[in-house]
Image: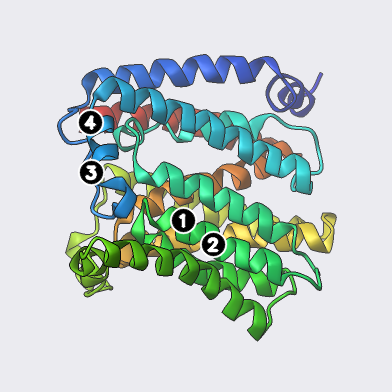
């Protein structure tokens, strides 16, 4: 049996690897948890209104925070896999989305404890599901409102997730539902959440508390190249950028194999990954949030790339990537 058929049978279509990846994910997370300083895990510069107070105190217990974050990793990985099954993103059967998702979201200490970014990542998948369901939908305004509403709710946990709303406006264009009406309705979805939030703070006579997150929106851009991190989280993003270039070039050469709708869906994930990388390095607001969203979007792209591998060089890259993954886990643990 040639290498490609062997690879597809033992890796891409091997259901047993899902169980193995779950066990491996738990082991990796337990090792990092053991060596991670629990006193720092609950500090998040972009925590929203609902991430402060009692919720933060509850999650300050390291074991509870670790357990909930691990549960979210599996939920996000499962949802991403179901997103593929529902919308047919990958034309061949594969279990790689679940495997990649759980392992990537366990590759760095920043993923080990429960953070508001896990809620934003799940919200991103929900919004992406709604977006894909809106393709050429004449009644797309309903989903446009729902996307704005979900982003608004998620921003109550991770405030700067609001900056991903314009990304979905681009998505409206890709799904051929971009209209001024849908643009306004998506904003109204967010406004609904913040109007209710404002009423609550007004009732509490705490307008300053409501305005607090907005006071940190300036400055926006990072103009200092020296401050760009090249180790830790930055190393993961640099590797993701190199992979994104490879995946994008390959997909441009092979996208004709997919239907127009699937090409639009995949293109949205490419744009999301690129936006997350640019935002990580050049937008001051909460770079770790961008790392989470990038991890989610590139998981599906990697699964698409390696599932449809028909050349041996792609298989070689797969095994090299495994070595890089464990090397990064070790380096990040040391740092």
Residue furthest bottom as drawn: 180
Q: What is the x, y in percent for residue 303?
A: 64, 39
In-image side of 126 versus 227 (left or right) = right
Whether tag 1 and tag 2 are in contact, CB under 8 A, the answer is yes
Q: Secondary structure at mark 3?
A: loop
The residue closer to the viewer here, 306 or 22, is 22
Tell me the distance, in whole angstroms, between the alpha carbons under discs 3 and 4: 11 Å
Verify CB contact (< 8 Å) between mark 4 and mark 1: no
Percent from the top left, x then y, of residue 291? Answer: 39, 49
The answer to which of marks 3 and 2 sits earlier in the sequence is 3
Per the image, the residue denoted by label 2 is: 149
Q: Nearer the viewer, mark 3 or mark 4?
A: 3
Q: Circle 2 — which element?
A: helix
* Mark 1 lies on residue: 153
Front residue (pair 127, 174): 127
First of labels 4, 1 by sequence position: 4
Q: Decide: marks 4, 2 in contact (CB < 8 A)?
A: no
């Amino acid at each position: 049996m040639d290498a490609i058929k062997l690879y597809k049978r033992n890796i891409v279509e091997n259901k047993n690897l899902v169980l193995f990846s779950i066990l491996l994910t738990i082991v990796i997370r337990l090792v990092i948890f053991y060596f991670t300083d629990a006193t720092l895990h609950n500090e998040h510069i972009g925590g929203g209104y609902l991430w402060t107070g009692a919720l933060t105190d509850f999650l300050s217990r390291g074991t509870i925070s670790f357990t909930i974050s691990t549960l979210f990793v599996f939920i996000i990985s499962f949802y991403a896999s179901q997103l593929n099954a529902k919308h047919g993103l990958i034309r061949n059967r594969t279990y790689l989305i679940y495997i990649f998702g759980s392992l990537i979201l366990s590759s760095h200490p920043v993923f080990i404890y429960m953070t508001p970014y896990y809620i934003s990542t799940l919200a991103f998948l929900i919004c992406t599901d709604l977006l894909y369901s809106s393709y050429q939908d004449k009644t797309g305004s309903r989903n446009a409102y729902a996307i704005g509403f979900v982003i608004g709710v998620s921003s109550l946990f991770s405030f700067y997730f609001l900056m991903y709303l314009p990304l979905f406006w681009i998505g409206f264009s890709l799904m051929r539902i971009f209209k001024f009406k849908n643009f306004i309705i998506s904003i109204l979805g967010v406004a609904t959440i913040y109007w209710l939030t404002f009423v609550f703070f007004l009732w509490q006579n705490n307008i300053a508390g409501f305005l607090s997150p907005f006071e940190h929106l300036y400055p926006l851009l990072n103009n200092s190249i020296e401050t760009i991190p090249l180790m830790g989280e930055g190393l993961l993003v640099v590797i993701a950028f190199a992979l994104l270039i490879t995946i994008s070039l390959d997909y441009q050469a092979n996208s004709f194999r997919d239907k127009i709708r699937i090409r639009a869906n995949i293109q949205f994930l490419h744009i999301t990954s690129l936006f997350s990388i640019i935002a990580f390095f050049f937008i001051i607001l909460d770079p770790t949030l961008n790392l989470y969203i990038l991890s989610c979007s590139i998981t599906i792209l990697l699964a698409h790339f390696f599932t449809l591998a028909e050349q041996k060089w792609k298989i070689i890259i797969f095994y090299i990537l495994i070595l890089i993954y464990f090397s990064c886990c070790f380096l990040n643990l040391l740092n």
